[in-house]
Image: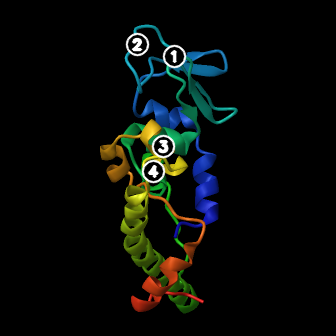
Amino acid sequence: MITQSTIDKIKDVQLSEVVGSYIKLTHKGVNYQACCPFHYEKTPSFSVNDVKGIYKCFGCGAGGNVIDFVMQHDKLTFVEAIAKIASIVKMEVEYEQETEADKEKRKKQLSEAEAQEKVLNLVIPIYQQQLADLPMDHPAKIWAAERFDDDVLAQWKIGWAPNDWRFITPILIKENLFFA
């Protein structure tokens, strides 16, 4: 994991230095201006302010800090953007040492997430069937029919859980997925 001090140093980088490595900036007062790299335009509406550490496009509304810019421009994750900015400004990225306790905690979190995913994968089709089996005049069926077609219901895995949810417990116990 990247250290907080590295993240703080990256946030303090001159925004114009990073943005200027992507597009040509023109100095206008305390700001820099350019045509926005996020949408087509002929007249510059993109502004960079090093004092505040933010950019803003008054045409498309894009805005944020140096990390946001690189993430949006290059379609990168937070960690990837940190590495990219560090390479642009020739800064070293520091990483925290992961202890055995941290590794065990991460492993436990992964196993808990996997168990939760198994439960969801088991109950989603059951709740989808619950919705499908409702009479046409049931309020939940009417609500769903007014808002979604069958393709959307299937794509978004929309279902219905009755007030008495206890019917699902025996199924979870049978599959050894019940957590007390």
Residue at the disc numbered 4:
81
Residue at the disc numbered 3:
142
**CA distance separating discs 4 and 1:** 24 Å
Check disc 1 and give the amino acid type.
Answer: Gly
Mark 1 or mark 3: whose residue is earlier in sequence: 1
**CA distance separating discs 1 and 3:** 42 Å
Q: 137 and 122: which one is in front?
A: 137
Residue at the disc numbered 2:
41
Q: Residue at x 43, y 57 (%)?
A: 134
Q: Single out the mark in the foreground, 4 or 1.
A: 1
Check disc 2 and give the amino acid type.
Answer: Glu
Q: Single out the mark in the foreground, 1 or 3.
A: 3
The crowd level at tag 3 (other Cα within 10 Å; few <14, some 14-19, many 20+) is: few
- As helix, strand or loop, the secondary structure at mark 2 comes to loop
Q: Residue at x 45, y 81 (%)?
A: 115
Q: 162 and 172: which one is in front?
A: 162
- As helix, strand or loop, the secondary structure at mark 3 comes to helix
**CA distance separating discs 4 and 3:** 46 Å
